[in-house]
Image (cartoon, rainbow, N blue to C red):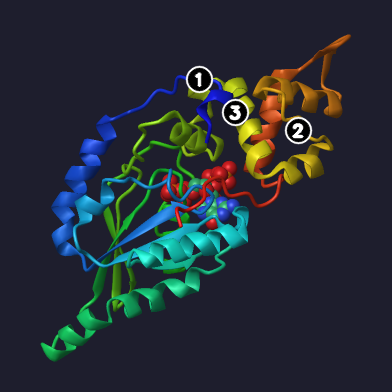
């Protein structure tokens, strides 16, 4: 996207987590048969750690596109194809409702069919497959694992960045999951990635300037989903306006008045970010795959 139309932001980052994640992956990778990476389907690129490819080597890979209920269905299909083209298996799901989660076990068994056959040939019938589950904080790992396990196996709803110890979760006699809680931070090397993580609540928005975040988000929505702004806020985003002016235009429509002629941009910023989080703007995916 054209950087010039976006406001500059300062977002704090916590690189220490990455070293810990690298160490943990390195120590455990030899024990697992495959790696399953959970991504947010609205930001499949920003919610990945690009180093993961080198960290996990040539282990078979499964990608879970989670939060599909909030993502643009047609774009999710495109993301699925793009990961498949890189040799990964992909399932789409909404871990909160459980939709799509049933595809996980069959997908693992298909992915590891050769391994299962090799185990059987060695007389190791029924040896559990071991899968490492990776994902950035708040992407839905605990919710997903609970749904797959069919019980309360992992504590869901932790605040972003809160870490717990690693744990093995037995799904059935043929499958064990290694949960690697909240320590796989995404690569945070540009402002756009930071903003995408903040608007999807992967990083706490109380550490950043919400008005600037919302102003830039307005611009992004004007570029990608102007029809959603029109449907929700009954205004046509003017191409000539900057993000703050768009927030003001929208506040006017909403009647967020502070005093005569002055509109409440802060309230509008909170409303926009809150309503996106609640899915009130529709199913919007904020990144497109390179095709
Ligand atoms: P984590 O282990 O990766 O840190 O994430 P966790 O499972 O705790 O999930 C974080 C939040 O995301 C939880 O909501 C959970 O309900 C929600 N979530 C997980 N998967 C999905 C999904 O597929 N769709 C939707 N819509 N939500 C999902 P929470 O703690 O109540 O926070 P909130 O984000 O709902 O406000």
Whether the residue carrying mark 3 lies under 8 Å from ligand 1 is answered with: no
Look at mark 3 in the image and give the residue it sits on.
Answer: 216
Report if residue 181 is visible in the image: yes
Q: Sequence-wise, which precedes: disc 3 or disc 2?
A: 3
Whether the residue carrying mark 1 lies under 8 Å from ligand 1 is answered with: no
**Label 3 crowd (10 A; few <14 / some 14-19 / many >=20):** many
Q: Secondary structure at mark 1?
A: loop
Percent of width and height locating residue 164: 32, 44
Q: Secondary structure at mark 2?
A: loop
Q: Give the Cα separation between the discs numbered 2 and 1.
A: 21 Å
Find the residue positioned furthest to the left: 122
Depth order, front residue of 211/172:
211
Report if residue 94 is visible in the image: no
Percent of width and height locating residue 52: 27, 50
Q: Is residue 189 left or right of residue 150?
A: left
Look at mark 2 in the image and give the residue it sits on.
Answer: 237
Q: Residue 8 shows which numbered tag?
A: 1
Find the residue positioned furthest to the right: 260
Q: Give the Cα separation between the discs numbered 3 and 2.
A: 13 Å
Q: Sequence-wise, which precedes: disc 2 or disc 1?
A: 1
Percent of width and height locating residue 101: 49, 68
Residue in the image at 27% along x and 82% along y: 113
């Amino acid at each position: 996207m054209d950087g010039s139309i976006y406001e500059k932001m300062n977002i704090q980052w916590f690189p220490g987590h990455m070293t810990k994640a690298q160490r943990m992956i390195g120590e455990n990778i030899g024990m697992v048969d495959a790696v399953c990476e959970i991504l947010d389907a609205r930001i499949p690129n920003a919610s990945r750690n690009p180093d993961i490819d080198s960290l996990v080597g040539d282990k078979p890979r499964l990608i879970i596109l989670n939060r599909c209920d909030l993502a643009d269905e047609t774009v999710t299909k495109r993301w699925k194809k793009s990961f498949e083209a890189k040799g990964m298996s992909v399932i789409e799901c909404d871990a909160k409702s459980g939709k799509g989660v049933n595809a996980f076990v069959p997908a693992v068994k298909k992915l590891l069919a050769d391994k299962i056959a090799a185990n059987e040939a060695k007389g190791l019938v029924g040896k559990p497959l071991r899968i490492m589950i990776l994902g950035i904080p708040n992407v839905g790992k605990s919710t997903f694992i609970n749904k797959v396990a069919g019980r309360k196996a992992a504590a869901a709803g932790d605040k972003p960045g809160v870490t717990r110890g690693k744990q093995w979760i037995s799904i059935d006699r043929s499958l064990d999951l290694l949960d690697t809680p909240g320590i796989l931070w995404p690569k945070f090397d540009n402002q756009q990635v930071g903003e995408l993580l903040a608007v999807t609540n992967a990083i706490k928005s109380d550490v950043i300037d919400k008005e600037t975040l919302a102003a830039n988000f307005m611009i992004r929505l004007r570029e990608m989903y102007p029809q959603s702004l029109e449907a929700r806020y009954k205004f046509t985003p003017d191409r000539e306006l900057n993000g703050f002016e768009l927030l003001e235009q929208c506040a006017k429509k909403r009647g967020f008045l502070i005093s005569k002629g002055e509109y409440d941009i802060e309230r509008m910023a909170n409303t926009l970010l809150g309503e996106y989080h609640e899915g009130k703007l529709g199913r919007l995916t904020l990144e497109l795959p390179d095709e």
